[in-house]
Image (cartoon, grey):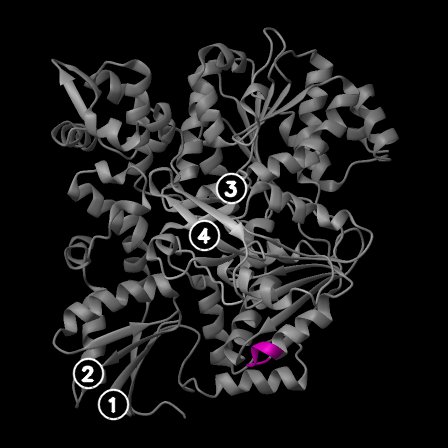
Amino acid sequence: MSSVFSSLHESLQQVLAQRLEWTELREVQERTYSAVVTGNDVLVIAPTAGGKSEAALIPVIDDILKNGRMGVTCLYISPLKALINDQEDRFGAFCIPTSLSVMKWHGDVPKGDRSWKDGEPPHFLMITPESLEVLLQEKKLSSDLRRVRTIIIDELHAFVESDRGVHLKVLLDRMDRLTKRPVQRIGLSATVGNPEEVLAWLSDGRKRGELVVVQNTPKEKQFQFIVNAEEKDRINALVRIVDGKKALVFVNSRGVAEKLMKESAGRIRNLHIHHSSLSPATRKTSEEAFSSTEGACIICTSTLELGIDIGDLDVVVQVGPPNSVSSFLQRMGRSGRRGKSAFVAWVLQNPCELLCSLAILECAIQKEVENLISPKKPYNVLLQQIFLYMYNHSRASRRQLAASLLSHPVFSSIEPEIFEQIITHLIASGYVTTDGEMVMLGTEAERMFGHSNWKELYSVISGGGEYRAVTPEGEVVGKLDARFVNSRNSEEISLGGRNWSMVKCDEGHNLVVVIPGGSDSSRIFWTSAGESGFSPLVCRRIQKICARGGSVLPLGEHEQEILQNVLVRVPEEINEDGLYVIEQSGKKGVEVLIFSFSGSRFNRLLTLLLQDRLGGRAQVRYNDFIVKVMHAGKEGTGQRVTRVIQEIQKMGKDEIGSILPVPQAHGWKFACALPPELLSDLTLSAYYHAEEFMSDMKSRQVLFLKEVIPQ
């Protein structure tokens, strides 16, 4: 029996021994306990299903029992309501037998259940950031949060790079202010490429941070590759792999999920679908499918990457390669639990997809995972907090507003002059009105965000681009993309694997009434939220595979042959680093190919700058790996493009910013209220990622390889 196990409160020991049949703790739980009891902030990184949730729970429960703590002692913050629903039973299994109470609080919980009697708050409150923002506005209930000692943040990696992460940081700081002490923070994650930096992001220098990293126990992994250009053959292969088994089939978009569901219907027993635009009830039905003793298959997107427990799996199928190593590790972690070998089958369309898949696997084997980078210009969340502050205080002075908001560590990079510039613009544009030195919410803020008692202020997530699809009886089917609904190209849709007909559209309430029915040609699309494509880490690994002329993975003869079919099209001169310019004669004249292997984000920006510098009739196109220049001249074009790239390497941020178009502010919920120059600044940082581009460009050697690429 471990020293930690024997030191636990007797009631907790009994729960672990009698109900869970534990006689000792896993390594991650022992090490996490030792870190948490010191009072440090802790980041726990361990494989999917590695026991991270229990690792965070055990020391907190032990502390409550030993010290007789009352009231809300621990907040559990999750990025997903579904994950809270899933974790509720797990928390209850530990807490209820020890007479500790657990409550979940989020938008899908009936309003009457989002409360507690005076003097009877739960010990554990499970909540999303947006719901915590709502709770902090309720003075009576929020006063019961003053006793919170620990905040557990699950799937921390899902927050760090987004505005939700900035919002979370504000909420964590407000909890410190409410409790009048630094509340201990415990972050949980399965995949982080730069754990020390993420720990610093979590802790904010308030107290000492401690990192607990537990690696995967080496065990056998099985991979199968199906590469076929014919869709019918790929579907047949998928059916053979999953039928009669418990399987997750991961795809990279909601549209592909719906299409694959339709093509597989009737051929796979107990088939379900799971993605973010389906109703909670539909997703819950899918999640519960694995409780069946028979085989079950769920076609899903990244919604099942996170820690929702779907039990033992026989196989994970990846239809097309995912866009990052992190995503793949989350998906693979669903297989190979409880002593089984992990089995991942890849169903791929062409040799290029095989190359990308092998690059992801090589990175995973080398334990290379994408770094998480937090937003550098948190203007969108700052605006949200400005509006919230004025909503809660009715009237406030500029000095009072600035002092309160700029004191949050996450806004420390924003100078007082920038804050004053924002307030001045808000006044000029009608978002804010004044009464002497006092500022108040104006008519424009009310028009944009004042609906339904200002509920839009509680979240930084933009939600105006979707319509709810409901039946005449009021059953929610899911969500439809606004562009699809407004296009009126079709009155028939496929959603949740079923055909529906749209019979009525209420634009005022973003509502579509649907009834069962429709033809097999029913379709649907969703507007992508951002730039899709492979991560730079994956793209650079592809460059290494191309440079060495093969993969280090033990492939069969058939896979080796398929891989060589794509590698033979890459110039032999390409090395593991550098940016290569090649001139070739094409059907439409001279073309220049720039092999960057840097991903769509980098290549999009390079394309825009090249288009501006080359001018004239030049056309520039890009994908994850190559930028293609056409109609830029007949002689010496490659050398000219090389010189232009070298000029771009020397450009500063302001010069780059003067060239790039500023996209509409729709991607950021509150950015419509920013001064134009700050919107441009936000665009450069958060949309174009100009600083990373400039750093990458300056580090790359540009090489001109004259003449022909192998055919």
Q: Is residue 275 left or right of residue 161?
A: right
Percent across and percent down for residue 409 are 36, 29
Which callout, 4 or 2, points at the residue further toward the start of the chain? 4
Q: Which residue is mark 4?
A: 502
Q: Amino acid at mark 1?
A: Lys
Considering depth in this image, is 520 or 57 the residue closer to the camera? 520
Which callout, 3 or 4, points at the residue further toward the start of the chain? 3
Whether the residues at callouts 3 and 1 have beta carbons within 8 Å, the answer is no
Q: Amino acid at mark 2?
A: His
Q: Label 2's element?
A: loop
Q: For residue 651, what is the image quadrant?
A: bottom left
Q: Which mark is residue 631?
A: 2
Q: Which residue is mark 3?
A: 472
Q: Label 1's element?
A: loop
Q: Amino acid at mark 4?
A: Met
Give how far apart the Cα atoms at labels 3 and 1 are: 55 Å
Which callout, 2 or 3, points at the residue further toward the start of the chain? 3
Whether the residues at callouts 2 and 3 have beta carbons within 8 Å, the answer is no
Percent across and percent down for residue 42 are 57, 33
